Image: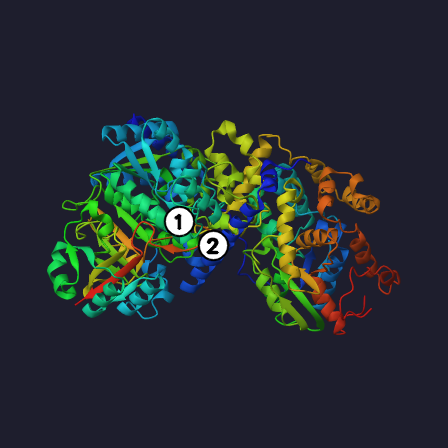
Amino acid sequence: MNPQPLDRFAERLRPEVRQSVHLGCAGATQARLTALTRDFEDPEPLRRLAAEIRQHTLDHLDTYLEAAESSMRRRGIEVHFAEDGETARKLILSLLRDHGAQRICKSKSMASEEIELNGFLTRAGIAVVETDLGEFIIQLDEDHPSHVVRPIAHRNRGDVASTFQKHGLGDWDDRPEIITRRARAYMRNQYLSSHAALTGGNFISAESGRLVLVTNEGNARFSLAASRLHIALVGIEKIVPRDRDLSVLLGLLARSATGQHLSVYTEFIAGPKAPGQPDGPEAMHVILFDNHRSTVLASSCREILRCIRCGACMNVCPVYRQASGHAYRHVYPGPLGAVLGPLLRDPAEFPEMADLPKASSLCGACQEVCPVDIPIPDLLLRLRDRTHREKIPSSGSSLPLREWSLLASHPLAWRAALFAGSAVNLLPPALLPSAALRTWSQHRTLPKWRGGAFRAWFRLRRRPGGPEAEALALEAEELLPGTPV
Amino acid sequence: MLPRRPVNRTLPLPHKRLQLMITCLCDAFYADVAQASVEILEHLGCEIEFPEAQTCCGQPAFNSGDWEAARRVIRHTETVFGGNLPIVVPSGSCSAMLQHGNALCFERQPDLPQIVDLGRRAWEIVDYIVNGLGVRCWPGRLAARAAFHASCHSRGSRTTEAASRLLSTISGLELLHPNEPEQCCGFGGSFAVTFPHISTSMGNLKIENLLALEPDFVVSADMSCLMHQQGLAQKQGRPLTVRHFVQVLRDALRNGGFLGPA
Amino acid sequence: MTGDHRERILQSVRDALRPLREHGHPAPYPEYDVASTVASRRLTGGPSWESFRSNLESVHGVFLDSPAALVSYLHSRDAQRGYCDPALASSVRRLLGPDFTLDTVFDRDQIDLYAFGITKAAAAIAETGTVILHDTRTSSRLGALAPWIHVAWLTRDSLLTSLGQAVSSLGDDPNIVFVTGPSKTADVESVIVEGVHGPGEQVVYLSD
């Protein structure tokens, strides 16, 4: 059998990348667990509540979109709508040109990654600087983020030191503290000379029209203190009904993402700066961005839109830990991306992403850690069903499932097969009768076939006093210490 | 939204009559697990029905996306396991399929109600013993170090907690818990052969964590996980003995003289 | 252009939700008590400044409640020049004495010369060790952010119990920021480094 593209990517991954990814993920998984159990008697009800709030919002998204829009307008925020990436890019460029903005500071926004905004703006003659440390390094490397919270999860300190050296940010030094100080010094001048701040948005409250932005580094806050124009690109699903709902979501977001009880900077923005405040934007524009989200809402996977981008699912995911984020070939990696990646692409491109929903052992760890309880394994299964119904060819579909299902619904044939199957005990792995069995046997032994043995034992032992019963007693598979023979 | 797996339930009656589903894996490979299931249930005074026409829970096709094929098998299972007795399964994975996966597979099918009913009657065997029958303490003895593998499909059920509690009452048995217990061993059905590199890498991490405990054996709710772990270890020439929960319970009874020898 | 997009997006959202409205069960809004969202184990000392202090210190924030402590803290950091809210300047000058230079206008060209910034905070949250800055009450966003040390000036009557209480009463201020400890990152190999773009030291000064 030919392995799927994601498996081949994982096989070629450099060991040091896998090592960085594994360490970061294992640490974050532990931090999340510690934070939740340290702070709550039982975090489970909170997770359920967060799920209900998010699902309710999605199920009434039309109402909440209009409510959010009118609340924002009331606050003096200019609200725009963009159906796709092309529209969003042009809109942002025209807003920048209207304000004479040539230099912009950007704080981490996955939505902007979806539309490859940096390249577009740069080609249009706008100087763009990513201000989040990880995203800054990604930008210097002309790389892509491999994680929604830790963009350089796939890079180690040595890589970063080399990047900084190459770009004239000091001699090679791989101490994280030195790297951070250099970024601090460099970025201040960027902030102070920028004309506009471009951000994403973690939430928008429909009730108050407040855009909520969460960072730890303070980069979004700095951009918004130093520049005169604020443009936020926000997915239409990021709305919450009421301000109070933020208490549920913010606490879970921080704990699930990094194990903090709250992120360092949580900014609630409702329009341009206050009169009398010397620093900050004089104009604020929010672009509500669809880019296939309404298609996802119409699909059987709409629960994925509950996502608040904490990254806990990818941290805990054993497949992500082996493959790293770039294996998912999309902005959103891990279990989240295995669902969202194929759906956010143009429907015509679904087939080439169809290996992603299969890239899971369905272990369910992702749902267990998800702060909004997204049934990710169920959604992966629904996408596998879709792949099968749409007859999308893939290298993984060569299991003879139809034949198997006929066998498994005809008991006589099933029992005959149980008996006949013992032939596999005699075959060397290379001659096994199916590609699946041969692939299995490359790395693992097959257990001994004992087809029907239990059935025979069960039937015979029922005869009172039947001597056959003892004769047929099954051989113990391994002797245990202390087991009488 | 789909129904969650039932977690807070008791048996409706003093039900010691049950139907046993032995799973296709035990039917084909692990006959001793099925036998041990019978032995411990009968030791507890249960009356066991074994529907001869049973085959498989349907999971292979369901997980691979061929839901039509899966529904054919599930409908067969629903017919075979008629009546209202509890259905007891020595597998966290197959019971999860019956309790939750089936409903997903039949979401827009006219016979969804019957399929949901089938799931309501399904019990993973240790859950049945501990939370259904109320057994809190296990007799017998077994002097061994057992590495506990919490199988993934037992997530969201009471199996892991029940098994860990019950096994720890066995005299002489030392229960050991590996690092990163939440990490999957990489079996995943067809995943093991369509993503062979990732699957075996996951499995290798798992067996490292298990072997680090220097156990006499690994114990779990699912033979599928154990088949993968043992298959990997054996291929590398490293001995890894595996036991299902029910084999450990049965062996403890034997050692304590509560059951005749094998 | 964006008007057409507005209509089209709303229409696709309505279309997407129609089957759910007609045949399904749209999820209801879960009514809940905001108090139920509190991390009770972070408030073992009750809604008190003591709880606030311990939660602030858990994120490496610094809690000072006497003039002498503030003076000695700034001395220990060799922080002699800083930005100060003009409304606080006279009392701060009295408090700090002649060793310190205070600017009451934040000069962007001097950004590297400010070792500290002192600005008023609107409130604090006991549950999380958070200080809340309002745009209308913060004399300069940069003054509260750019210097290595930020001193948030708080009064004793400004303590809120929980995050839930704080987000449920945001009020009208156009820009509110919750600050919970010093600026930090873990982007490089998950090693936590404090003082990325914002303060490396977040001080809360409780005035009488």
Q: Is residue B60 visible?
A: yes
Q: Which residue is mark 1?
A: A179
Q: Which label's residue is closer to the chain start, 2 or 1? A: 2
Residue projecting furthest to the left: C90
- Find residue C52 and report its image quarter: bottom left
- Find residue A228 and report its image quarter: top left
Q: Are marks 2 and 1 on the same chain?
A: yes
Q: Which residue is mark 2?
A: A28
In this rendering, the count of numbered labels is 2
Against A258, is A416 above or below?
above
| Residue A235 drawn at (x, y percent) | 37, 38
Question: How far is mark 2 from mark 1, CA to CA?
Answer: 21 Å
Q: Is B179 left or right of C170, judged from the image as shown?
A: right
Chain assignment, label 2: A
Q: Quadrant of the C terminus of chain A?
A: bottom right
Identity of the residue drawn at 13% across and 63% down: C98
| Residue B59 drawn at (x, y percent) | 64, 45
Chain assignment, label 1: A
What amino acid is found at the position of numbered circle 1 in the picture?
A: Ile
